[in-house]
Image (cartoon, rainbow, N blue to C red):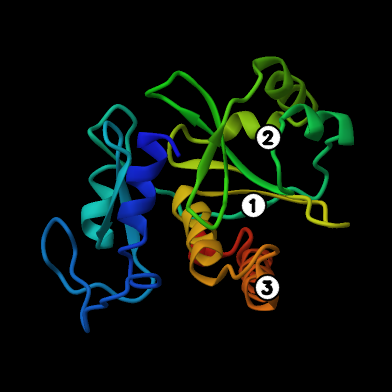
Amino acid sequence: MSPGSSSVFNSLVRLREFAANRRTVELCGFCAAELPQHHEHLLEIATRKMECVCRGCAILFTNQGQKYQRVPRRVRALADFRMTDAQWEALAIPIGMAFLFYSSLDNKVVALYPSPGGPIESLLPLQSWEEIANDNPQVREMKPDVEGLLIHRIRSARDYYLIPIDECFKLVGIIRTHWKGISGGYTVWEQVATFLSVLRQHAESEFYN
């Protein structure tokens, strides 16, 4: 696991959904206002650490180039996404799931995939990404650092979404928390299916815009 991906994960596992020692009331990391269960997040670009914040504080960091970047809430299902088996195999991801995003720190597209130990960064061949982006121009609309492409190709599934980075790490948290044995066990895949079902329900919804 790279230091950057590790720091993001370590901050995200402290979110209410995955923290082992939850507080009764979650507070904004900036103004200490009480937060609802579904609240916004800011990403500190230099460290890739996540902050739970209220909407008022999140709005202050909407523009690019700031120390913190507001994590978008929109989810977009890419029904017409084009990817061949050869393109997928060229990414050299050992499981059928990955999250790709543009890192302004590294000035490149980074590929992460979930594992029982947390997110693992995979070296992404530039040529492979360019082929994918040329076939699917919508991926060039991703906001750097805070939004990315979720690829789900486990078994016969072929699902593709543009999602916020905190949603990506929620999925990582689900897998790390529920994985059992060699294959993961029934519970972890049931939880993953529920996560993907929620994504489909909220794609392009007002809640995530």
Q: Count how many numbered circles sit on residues in the image.
A: 3
Residue to which mark 1 is pinned: 76
Q: Splitting the image into 4 quarters, where does residue 91 fall? A: top right
Mark 2: few, some, or many residues within 10 Å (few <14, many ≥20)?
few
| Amino acid type shown at disc 1 | Arg
Mark nearer the N terminus (1 vs 3): 1
Farthest left residue in view: 31
Work out how far the residue at label 2 is from the one at label 1, CA to CA, in angstroms.
10 Å
Farthest front residue in view: 181
Work out how far the residue at label 1 is from the one at label 3, CA to CA, in angstroms.
29 Å
Work out how far the residue at label 3 is from the one at label 2, CA to CA, in angstroms.
35 Å
Above or below residue 17? Residue 45 is above
| Amino acid type shown at disc 3 | Gly
Expressed as whole percent of the image width and height from the top left, the position of residue 191 reads 62, 74
Q: Splitting the image into 4 quarters, where does residue 22 fall? A: bottom left
Nearest to the observer: residue 136 or residue 207: 136
Residue to which mark 2 is pinned: 138
Expressed as whole percent of the image width and height from the top left, the position of residue 27 reads 18, 69
Above or below residue 107? Residue 44 is below
Expressed as whole percent of the image width and height from the top left, the position of residue 3 reads 35, 35
User: Tag on residue 33?
Assistant: none
* Left or right side of 207 for 150: right
| Amino acid type shown at disc 2 | Gln
Mark nearer the N terminus (3 vs 2): 2
Residue to which mark 3 is pinned: 185
Mark 1: few, some, or many residues within 10 Å (few <14, many ≥20)?
some
